Amino acid sequence: MTSLKPSSRRYSLKQAAAMLGTGRTTLCRKLRELGMLDANNLATRPHTASGRLVVEIRAYNNPGFGQPRAYGKTLVTERGIFYIAERLGMEISTAGEKNGRD
């Protein structure tokens, strides 16, 4: 497994999938099967409490509603990348880190 420098870096599900050599949809399906994500692809409590996943609250302006609407976005920590790679038997590639934002 490739070694990553310790940091508090967080990755989108798309970036994490690229680092693990798979696609976002496939990764989300596997994480739901492991119980790490719910049906809306939001992190479950045991994995946020352990620091593997983070749910960031964001907002967007919807002209139809006239005010900002909040939504949650799941991010994977470096600790989470290692955990997922181990659980799914995948290799970590730092080349996926170069992908743009989700």
Image: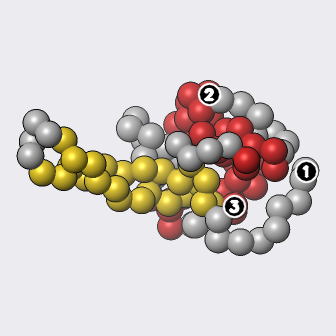
Horizontal side of 90 relative to 79 (left or right) equals: right
**What's the amino acid at mark 3?**
Glu
- On screen, residue 11 above or below 20: below
Residue 18 visible in the displayed image? yes
Q: Earlier in the sequence, mark 1 or mark 3?
A: 1
71 on left or right of 31: left
CA gap between label 2 and label 1 equals: 21 Å
* Residue plotted at (14% across, 39% down): 63
**Residue at 62% of width from left, 27% of height from top?**
26
x and y percentages locating residue 22 in the rendered image: 71, 31
Q: Is residue 91 left or right of residue 36?
A: right
| Label placed on residue 26 | 2
Amino acid carrying label 1: it is Met
Which of the labelled discs sits on residue 1, or is there none?
1
Q: Secondary structure at mark 1?
A: loop
- The first of marks 2 and 3 along the sequence is 2
Residue at position x 62%, y 44% in the image: 100
Q: Is 18 on the left-hand or right-hand side of 25?
A: right
- The crowding category of the residue bearing disc 1, from other C-alpha atoms within 10 Å (few below 14, some 14 to 19, many at least 20), is few
- At which x and y percent is residue 32? 52, 37
Name the one closer to the observer, 47 or 97.
97
Give the image location of residue 84, x and y in percent.
70, 48
Kindly indicate whether the residue at mark 3 contacts the one at mark 1 (C-beta within 8 angstroms): no
Residue 78 tag number: 3
Residue depicted at 35% across the width and 59% down the height: 57
Kind of residue at badge 2: Thr
Q: Nearer the viewer, residue 43 or 22?
A: 22
